[in-house]
Amino acid sequence: MNQPINLNSFREGPDEDGRFGIFGGRFVAETLMPLILDLQAEWNKAKTDPAFQAELKDLGAHYIGRPSPLYYAERLTQHLGGAKIYFKREELNHTGSHKINNCIGQILLARRMGKTRIIAETGAGQHGVASATVAARFGLPCVVYMGATDVERQAPNVFRMKLLGAEVKPVTAGSGTLKDAMNEALRDWVTNVDDTYYLIGTAAGPHPYPELVRDFQAVIGQEAREQILAAEGRLPDMVIAAVGGGSNAIGIFHPFLDDKDVQIVGVEAGGKGLDGEEHCASLTAGSPGVLHGNRTYLLQDADGQIKEGHSISAGLDYPGIGPEHAWLHDTGRAEYVPIMDDEALEAFQLLTKLEGIIPALEPSHAVAEVIKRAPKMRKDQIIVMNLSGRGDKDIFTVGKILGMEL
Amino acid sequence: MTARMDKRFADLAAEGRPALVTYFMGGDPDYASSLEIMKALPKAGADVIELGMPFSDPMADGPAIQLAGQRALAGGQTLAKTLQMARDFRKDDDATPIVLMGYYNPIYIYGVDRFLDDALEAGIDGLIVVDLPPEMDDELCIPAVAKGINFIRLATPTTDEKRLPAVLKNTSGFVYYVSMNGITGSALPDPSVIGSAVGRIKAHTGLPVCVGFGVKTAEHARAIGASADGVVVGTAIVNQIASSLTADGKASAATVAGVETLVMSLASGVRASRLAAAE
């Protein structure tokens, strides 16, 4: 782990050029620059517009179902015999994950900008479903790019998107996973600049996306902070979340970053192990590079070619990570650790049996880290974990691996 | 700035015709064939060479150039080998300007200073790096210009009057006007629209303006060349290479010959395209 640097605040980034330290920035083709600058100008206005914030709050309460509960996982706590474990129940949101928080925010921005067509990329399909949902709610056509491999392994979400009226375009270029879907969405955007809004699903991409996605997701951490203070009268000792691109993690981390006594832990997809090629641990096993509009940690070879990631969870299957996580990693404010496919799978089953909650495979990685850490902590210590999505979409994948007939 | 580029455009201006700028992907489908293609380009009438640096995630390119990049990478191409290709080419040709075109990450990983030194030594005259807009000039543009390598910028239909000065500020060599919003290999828009866009850019700069994205035939080249200082052809050449390959993706006898024939035809187009007397 890096030596933590002393900053007055870890919550002031990015700077006006979209940088978190050396990370972030605006590495995009010239065609997109004017759009990104427009988006930034609109976002700067919306941030401080009481009407925008009021509408966001209203939709949050009545459409998403916010605030999501902070739940004391009593049986898991007893089973592990250490720290008290709380889950931030983002899986109870409308559409089943935290993704909707960002989608509602961005579609309001798109509407302010007069855009009439929505495009999005998706890996596991959670962001695609959330995008298709808000597009339906606001009556806008929506095209979702999804890697052909993911279309196959996330069939239920593909069907949901289609029901919601979105057009799902399978991407066969490259390896047919999330990064290829993102390439294809950028190509669509560069071709349809006048009417199209690109609804990025994670806290990555060119500035201002990492900032605005974080701000729309920070409601998770703001609520969790108030809820744990109400429940326990103090802040947690540790906050844990799974990290793919990193939107659910930055959402819960950000409001705690200046609480120096709160340990922050991000969990990356270790896939089949970091020794081989089959993982998605950008921070633990990657190096800084430039992709999809930002400088961040990437899985890449010695020539700067981007590698394919692997994870049991399609939502973590991205060879990069949001730039703010790269910066939190390098400053030492947050710690990032890998969890392997089989550990996540065990955690998935344990949580289902002990708490009656079927988690998505993405937060199952975070659950696996909780399983490792809680027993080593005192009983008066507290962990808050972001349970970012529900596992209904994953039961087929899990069933297949476990050799169960569905 | 490198003398080759400025001399080439000055000579062409004196001759009264636009430049034919030809793009191909370095290492597609293999190093030796690709070097032969590169050597054939000026002989067939190309005036400036754009040497593509393959990248795994070419966000601004269409399927043709993405596949060419995948073929090159599968054939073992690296940035070091692309520089070596330029070096090999320079043994026989010290007059044709070479512009490296691609994405930033392989350069960033190679190391900016080391890359610029090696590029200069290999006889590179300019760089086009798609994902480095003016806001990112500190990364590569300013160090490149300081070392005497042209940094050629893309201007697009979305680059409005307000933005043009920023785009042109550190640009040298020539300006590459992308004739439409979109990816490489799309359809060519109306030449009269392009003509007025070229005029708009020329009101802001004395640099030559070359136009690309969508040029496929000698007739396109002639029409675009009526208003532009240069015509860029990329996807058509890359497609020509792709169509010549054997079933298992290897070069055939037609690979180099096919490019020669196409480029000769395009060259006849730019040569039929006299610039207006006002130029």
Image (tube, coloured by chain):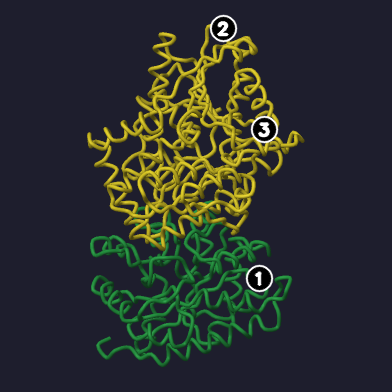
Chain colours: A yellow, B green
Mark pair 3, 2: CA separation:
27 Å
Can you say which quadrant of the picture contains the N terminus of chain B? Answer: bottom left
**3 and 2 marks on the same chain:** yes
**1 and 2 marks on the same chain:** no
At horizontal 37% and vertical 39% (from top left) the residue drawn is A104
Q: Nearer the viewer, residue B142 or B40?
A: B40
- Between label 3 and label 1, give the one nearer the viewer: 3
**Quadrant of the rendered structure where residue A278 is?**
top right
Please, what secondary structure does the residue beneath circle 3 have? strand
Mark pair 3, 1: CA separation:
38 Å
Numbered marks: total: 3
Look at the picture and state if A351 lies above or below B174: above
In x, y percent, where is residue B129? 45, 61
Identify the chain of the residue marked 1, using the numbered disc in the image: B
| Circle nearer the N terminus (3, 2) | 3
Q: Residues within 10 Å of mark 1 (few under 14, many from 20)?
A: many
Q: Which residue is mark 2?
A: A379
